[in-house]
Image: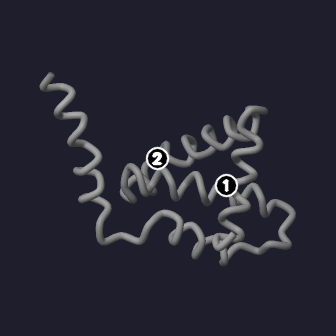
Amino acid sequence: MAQRERSSARPADLRRKTSGRPDLGTLVASRARALDRDAPDFKRRLLRLVVEASLLHEFGSHLLNAPKFQGIVEHVMHELESAPQMQDQVQRALQAVLSPSA
């Protein structure tokens, strides 16, 4: 019972930790505007941006300089790109970043 109470309090704790920071969507959208849409690897760079920003937002920006962080980003990207069942969701997420008002 105490375990359940602790876990139910966790989302409120996480919300407090993230207050004062721009939300993830705003952060990703602003960084995405800096990418060259004509680059041949634009979609891959956009996916990297989304994965990296999501992980940093969730677990803390201190991970950016962690030795294995980029490897984790690559691993997550590989899993997303190679899972057929994820293709629609990945494309919708990338499209949402490109046109957030839609």
Q: Is residue 28 above or below residue 30?
A: above
From the viewer's side, name the closer residue of 21 and 15.
Answer: 15
Question: Would you say 35 lies left or right of 27 here?
Answer: right
The residue located at (70%, 48%) in the rendering is: 90
Task: Give the residue at the far top of this rendering.
Answer: 1
Question: Would you say 62 lies left or right of 86 here?
Answer: left
Question: Would you say 9 lies left or right of 94 here?
Answer: left
Residue type at the position of mark 2:
Pro
Task: Give the residue at the far left of this rendering.
Answer: 2
Residue 32, image x, y percentages: 65, 71
Which circle marks residue 6 in the picture?
none
Q: Which residue is mark 2?
A: 67
Pointer 1 and pointer 2: residues touching (CB < 8 Å)?
no
Residue 16, image x, y percentages: 24, 59
Which circle marks residue 93 in the picture?
1
From the viewer's side, name the closer residue of 65 and 21.
Answer: 21
Query: How many circles with numbers are drawn on the protein?
Result: 2
On the rendered image, what quadrant is the C terminus found in?
Answer: bottom right
Q: Is residue 13 above or below residue 27?
A: above
Question: Would you say 5 lies left or right of 62 here?
Answer: left
The residue located at (24%, 51%) in the rendering is: 12
The residue located at (55%, 54%) in the rendering is: 52
> Under tag 1, what secondary structure?
helix
From the viewer's side, name the closer residue of 15 and 77.
Answer: 15
Q: Earlier in the sequence, mark 1 or mark 2?
A: 2
Residue 50, image x, y percentages: 60, 57
Asked which quadrant contains residue 64, the reply is bottom left
Q: For mark 1, does the 10 Å Cα neighbourhood hold few (<14), some (14 to 19), or many (20 or more) residues? A: some
> Under tag 2, what secondary structure?
loop
Q: For mark 2, does the 10 Å Cα neighbourhood hold few (<14), some (14 to 19), or many (20 or more) residues? A: few
Marks 1 and 2 sit apart, C-alpha to C-alpha, by 28 Å
Residue type at the position of mark 1:
Ala
